[in-house]
Image: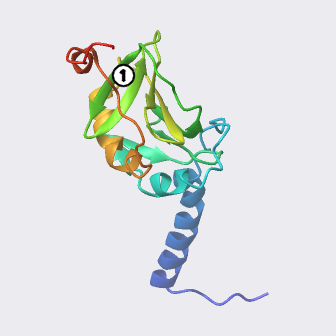
Amino acid sequence: MHRPQLSLSARTARLALIGSLAAIPLTSCSPPVDVPAAQDAANPACAPMMVALPDAIGENPLRKTNSQATAAWGDPSLVILRCGVNVPGPTTDRCVTVNGIDWVIKEGNPVWTLTTYGREPATEILMDPDKISSATVLADLAAAAGKVPAARNCVGQEDLQNLPPSQ
């Protein structure tokens, strides 16, 4: 059987194509991050926030997840986000405002849980402050979290000092 001879440039191009096709699975197929969906993940109010998420938090790129209304950044994941978690009620937990977004902070060891306050559905972030700054995370996610309208705001002790006396 006689096979036609390919020119050097044709062979080089063919090898380059085969090499690039073989490299695609190695570079683009990292498995999605397994993040359980929140109870209210199908809430349509999550959608505007999810499409506004940043491509990176600090130096950590956004990764694919396997559940609706979830996101993860970093490899390994340093920040996990879930929209549709239970809306926090009044609490004595620390509440901070970053770029107009109120967050209730529960400090765990090592993982902190940060949940939007006054927005429905609520969004939860899980992160380790020893590996990434909570200020960076909250600042980078503020614009996206703001896509869910606020109905209430955090009230701090300084807000309670000038209340009128009861009748």
Which corner quadrant of the image does residue 100 belong to? top left
Q: Give the colour scheme shown.
A: rainbow
In percent of width and height, residue 95 lies at 35, 22
Left or right: where does residue 38 sit relative to residue 95? right
Residue sitting nearer the eye, 118 or 44:
118
Q: For this rendering, which residue is in front, 131 or 144?
A: 144
Write the residue at 62% across / 50% down: 43
Q: Residue furthest right?
A: 1
Q: Residue furthest front?
A: 167
The answer to whether residue 163 is left or right of residue 43 is left
Q: How many marks?
A: 1
Question: Does residue 45 appear in the picture of this structure?
Answer: yes
Q: Position of residue 128 (x, y in %)?
A: 42, 21
Q: Quadrant of the N terminus?
A: bottom right
x and y percentages locating residue 84 in the rendered image: 59, 40
For the C terminus, give its image quadrant.
top left
Left/right of residue 64 with respect to residue 79 in the rendered view = right
**Given the image, on which type of amino acid does mark 1 rest?**
Lys
Helix, strand or loop under label 1: loop
Q: Which residue is mark 1?
A: 131
Q: What residue is shown at x 49% (from left), y 52% (from top)?
A: 50
**Farthest residue in the top direction?**
109
**91 above or below 86?**
above
How busy is the neighbourhood of tag 1: few (under 14 within 10 Å), some, or many (20 plus)?
few
Nearest to the observer: residue 155 or residue 78? 155
Residue 37: image x %, image y %?
65, 39
Q: Is residue 133 visible?
A: no
